[in-house]
Every structure is written in structure tokens, then in C-alpha cells.
Image (cartoon, grey):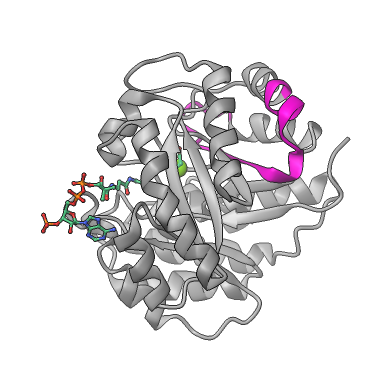
Amino acid sequence: AYPTSVRIVEVGARDGLQNEASVTTEQKITLINALCDAGLKNIEAGAFVSPKWVPQMADSTDVIKGLGIHPNVTFSALTPNLKGAEAALDVGIKEFAIFTAASEAFTQKNINCSIDESIERFKPVVELAKQRGVKVRGYVSCVLGCPYQGEVEPEVVLDVCKQLLAMGCYEVSLGDTIGVGTPNKVQSLLTLLLEHISADKLAVHFHDTYGQALANISKALEMGISTLDSAVAGLGGCPYAKGASGNVATEDVVYLLQGLGIDPQIDLERLAKAGWAICEALNKPPVSKVSLALKAK
Ligand code: HMG
Ligand code: MG
């Protein structure tokens, strides 16, 4: 059965913009404030990663400092190590996101270590979070395929998820980093995971490279998953996953949920406007079909 309420984690300002060189700090602030005004309650606002690796996120401190006051919104940020976690705490971040993968090759390219080493590296980050009353979300990339090794075993995904939950993540987000999954693969993976992990500890994070994200979300919802990651206007792509396109568009997810009778309490018009504004800065139209349809009306 479909869940009765769904939580959307908006990742456009991070996943969406980490690959885009031309966006100013001011434009990011405007985007995030607009997302808050549209009703989004969970917003990934930046990444405290090495500026040598992802220069696009180097202004995360200034972005988060520049945001308006939004008491009902939880802002999270990527914190791959203690250095990132400390920088995030300095600007008042209340939720960390640590990230690894179910593929050794991808983990090496993305965070320059093995999966086991990444887990070791996260331990002090989670410790610090506990001391400071900060929640920690875990990401597992490549859950339905890897740009370097191809097939990924669901058992490996399960193992990494278990380790992240055991160390203290309140939730693990399952990343189809390169958008290769289809609903039958989502079903097999979730069938295995749900034998060991309750649905309220899992989120899905679909990139839409092959146009399967909404179908995959529909399958995940049917299986009881109630946290969905998405990016306004379908922005995005991972710099360490060549050819990977954006996350599923938040506008499209909201429309789907409304159609299913699940009210995500988001103002779709305002959301679409926020998407058009950032896309103007990027000089390309939104990838969201819903956004294009609303504009054409
Ligand atoms: P490293 O080079 O192995 O680390 O990088 P290091 O400790 O040797 O540090 C190298 C340099 O970076 C040093 O500077 C550090 O100070 C600096 P130097 O001494 O040479 O001048 N540094 C930092 N600076 C600022 N903030 C930090 C930080 N850490 C080190 N936190 C590291 C290891 C993990 C840092 C690096 O590989 C990295 O930053 N990777 C991030 C990659 C990334 O952001 N990828 C995209 C996000 S993941 C994603 O998109 C997938 C997801 O969406 C889910 C899905 O779709 O699957 C989440
Ligand atoms: Mg992603």
C-alpha cells in the first residue's frame, strides 16, 4: 500500500548545482529561500567537501550564512569527513549527510578511499554529530548500477546500509547515481533490504538519466518507502559519474503524489517558479515535464 504521507528531501541546491560552474552564491541563496517559500521542509543546502574536488560547492558556508530565517525547514549538508562536519557546524547545520557507495570503484573516484575506509572516516563525524545533537543521514551510491563496474550486487547494498544504520544514521538514502534502474530492479533490491531494514529508515534517490525515475518512485512508494529525494527543475548530476543526468524533478514528484492523493504540502506554482528562476541563471529550460506544462498553460 502507498504511504499516507511522504517526505521530500530537496537536493537541487546541492546535487543539482554541484556540476554547474556558472551559479553565483546569491543565486543559490535566492533558490533555497524560494524552495522554503514553496513549502519544502528538508533541504540539502550545500556540501562541505574539498574545493579541489568540487569547486562548485566551495561557497557552501556563504550560501548557508546568507539564507533567511526558516524555522520550519531542516537544512542538511554533505560532510565527508571531520573537516567538513566542523565547517557545517560553524554555520548551524542540524543534519549531516555522509556518503559512500556499494561500488569500490565509485567510492575511490568519488571520495578517494575504499568503502571500509569511508565507514571508518565517518565514525568521528557521527560521534561529533551525537555530541552536538545533529542528525546524520547516510547515502549509498550506485545501488542499481555503477558507471565503472556495471552491475552491483543487492547484498553489497544491504551490507553498506546496515553499517551506516548501525553507526547511527537515522536513515539511508539509496542512490541510483546514474539512473539505470527500472522498477523490477527496484523491486528486487527493496525486497531484500526490507527483509532486514524497516521502510521508515530508507529513502530513494533516483537520477533520471534513462527516464525511469518516476516509474521507480511509484514502485518504491508501493513498497512502503515514504522519503523521496528530488531536485527542483530536475537539476543535477554527479561529477564522478560521467553522463549522469539530474535527479528526478521535484515538480514531477509533487504532481505524482497529488495524483495519488498524498498531499506533500508544497505549492507547485511557487516551486515551478523557483525552478524557472534558477534555470534562467543556468541558461537552459527545466527538465521537469510538469514545470514545462504549467508554463505552457
Ligand atoms: P582527499 O584528497 O583524499 O583528502 O579527499 P585529504 O584529506 O587528503 O585532503 C585533500 C585536500 O582537501 C586538503 O587540502 C584538505 O585540507 C582538503 P590541501 O592540504 O591539499 O590544501 N579537504 C577539505 N577542504 C574542505 N572541506 C573538506 C575537506 N576535506 C579535505 N571537507 C575527500 C577526500 C572526501 C575530501 C574528497 O574526495 C572530496 O571532497 N570528495 C567529494 C566528492 C563529492 O562531493 N562528490 C559529489 C557528492 S556525492 C553524490 O553526488 C552522490 C549522491 O548524490 C547520491 C547518488 O546520487 O548516488 C549523494
Ligand atoms: Mg545524487
Q: Quadrant of the C terminus?
A: bottom right
Q: Quadrant of the N terminus?
A: top right
Q: Residue at x 32, y 56 (%)?
A: 283
Q: Nearer the viewer, residue 136 or 32?
A: 136
Q: Residue furthest left?
A: 52
Give the image quadrant in which the ligand numbered 2 is located. top left
Q: Residue furthest bottom?
A: 69
From the top left corner, tell me how far across and down residue 264 is, in percent: 75, 58
Can residue 290 be seen? no
Up-down relation of residue 99 to residue 222 (above or below): below
Q: Nearer the viewer, residue 276 or 187?
A: 187
Range covered by the magenta-colored residues:
191-212
Q: Nearer the viewer, residue 183 or 27?
A: 183
From the top left corner, tell me how far across and down residue 77 is, in percent: 44, 61
Residue 196 colored magenta?
yes
Q: Residue at x 61, y 73 (%)?
A: 73
Q: Residue at x 58, y 50 (%)?
A: 169
From the top left corner, tell me how far across and down residue 106 is, in percent: 33, 29
From the top left corner, tell me how far across and down residue 139 is, in percent: 50, 43
* Residue 272, quarter of the rendered image: bottom right
* Residue 85, quarter of the rendered image: bottom left
Up-down relation of residue 100 to residue 12 (above or below): above
Up-down relation of residue 141 to residue 89 (above or below): above
Residue 115 colored magenta?
no
Q: Nearer the viewer, residue 270 or 53?
A: 53
